Structure formats: structure tokens, C-alpha cells
Image: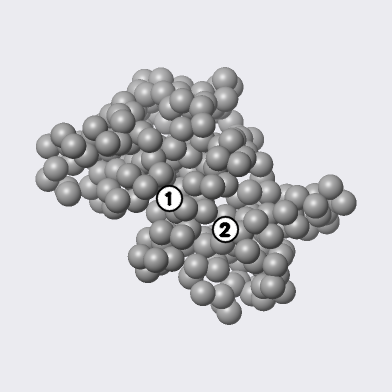
Amino acid sequence: MLSLKSVEYSVGEFKLKADFKIPRLSKVALIGPSGAGKSTLLSLISGFLKPNSGSIIIDNEDVTTKLSNQRRVTTIFQDGNLFPHLTVKKNISLGLRPDLRLNSAQQSVLDYAIDRVGLTDLVDRKPGSLSGGQQSRVSLARALVRDCPLLLLDEPFSALGPSLKSDMIELIDQIANEKKLTVLFVTHDPEDAKKICDLSVVVGNGCVSSPTLTTELFENPPKILSDYL
């Protein structure tokens, strides 16, 4: 599903190198110290940043020079990236059409996503009146309607309490299985990684490791990870 070939990115003194492959339908945790480059890596994959060299392949397509909206990738950010002046329904609809003029088929997709994440009774409310968990569900529903095979999660649930965060991670797991998604999940919590991620990638010292079985990684973590943990 995803291949980064000799990718290098640098800005100022910050440098990041990545050369790895992610199997289709896997769920992969990206873990490492703050500032190591986990969010930068997601931005390179999604097209918000351009590598200095190397190539990025998504679903057998070289997307290295493509814009973010030309890639079959959906990203859910830490802040949710919701528009405060729009209702829940309109925020989700933006994932289908920027002008919000949905046809009947798109309306059906919208209705499915709203129902799947449990927002049916909240569609006319605005983000400011929602709890953190409800806002996270809006962001997830908007990702669902885009129907992209690669889902990137940049710590979207870090502001939630333990119970709500656990519920959202379980919902991500269920939806990823239903929709046959490949997931990259930035987290600082090993327990989150163990919960749903079969593979993990360590980001640190300017490098990105190859995917490793999550259970094996935490049984025998490399020094940069053991120091961080």
C-alpha cells in the first residue's frame, strides 16, 4: 500500500530519512520522542510537504510530485480541523464536495458515515457545542466519506480522557476492518499501539525504522525507544 524509497527531507538543522514499505490492510503505529519527525513523516506521505529526494508510492502510484488533494490519503489531525461556523453535517460534507452540493449518491455516503460514528442526533449542531469525543467523531466521519484506502492519524485523540480515547481507537479499528483501510497512527502511548497496531515504526535520530511486529518491538525496544519510554 505504501512505499517510501530513499526519502530525505530537511529544513534548517532538522533532517529525516525514510526507506520502508507498509503492507496493505495493516495498522502501523509511529512512535518516538517529541520532535523526532512523526508528524513530518505523515505530512510527506499526505503531500503537505515535499521530500528533497526519494519517491513516495501509494497504492502502486508514484505520488511524489502530486498535490495533497490528488493522493488517495486521508489525514485526521490533532486539532480535528473543523470549521466552527459550519454544522456537523456540513463539516462532514466537505469531505465529499467543497461546495456542499451533494447528489443523491453522495448523500447516501454522508448518511452512512454519520450513522456509523454515532452522530445522527447532532448533525445540526456546530463544533463549539460538542464534546471533544464528539468532535473527534466528526473528523472521523469526514475521513470516511472520502473513501481513501490510506488513513493517517496524527494523534487525533490525545486531548481525550483515557476512556474516550480507548473508545475512539476501537472505533477506528472496527471501521478500518470494515472499509479495508491501511492505517498509520502517530501515538506517544505504547498501550495505544498495542491495542490495534500489528506493526510499529520507530522515528528518531533523523531516521525512520522499518516496520516491526509491535509485540516484539516493545519486548525488546531499541535504545532510543527505551530512553523515551
Q: Residue at x 68, y 54 (%)?
A: 113
Q: Is 33 or 22 nearer to us in this picture? A: 22
Looking at the image, the residue that sits furthest to the bottom is 129
Reading the image, the residue beneath label 2 is 139
Residue 36: x %, y % from top left: 26, 43
Residue 8: x %, y % from top left: 35, 28
Q: Secondary structure at mark 1?
A: strand
Q: Is 21 or 81 nearer to us in this picture? A: 21
Label 1, residues with CA under 10 Å away: few <14, some 14-19, many ≥20: many
Reading the image, the residue beneath label 1 is 154
Q: Residue at x 72, y 54 (%)?
A: 112
The three-letter amino acid code for the residue at tag 1 is Asp
Q: CA distance from mark 1 to mark 2?
A: 12 Å
157 w.r.t. 105: above or below: below
In the picture, residue 176 is in which quadrant? Answer: top right
Label 2, residues with CA under 10 Å away: few <14, some 14-19, many ≥20: many
Q: Is 10 or 210 nearer to us in this picture? A: 210
Left or right: where 115 falls relative to 202 = right
Q: Residue at x 59, y 36 (%)?
A: 180
5 w.r.t. 81: above or below: above
> Which one is earlier in the sequence, the residue at label 1 or at label 2?
2
The three-letter amino acid code for the residue at tag 2 is Ser
Count of numbered labels shown in the rendering = 2
In the picture, residue 7 is in which quadrant? Answer: top left
Visible in this render: residue 174? Answer: yes
Residue 152: x %, y % from top left: 48, 43
In the picture, residue 86 is in which quadrant? Answer: bottom right
Left or right: where 38 falls relative to 181 = left
Residue 188: x %, y % from top left: 29, 51
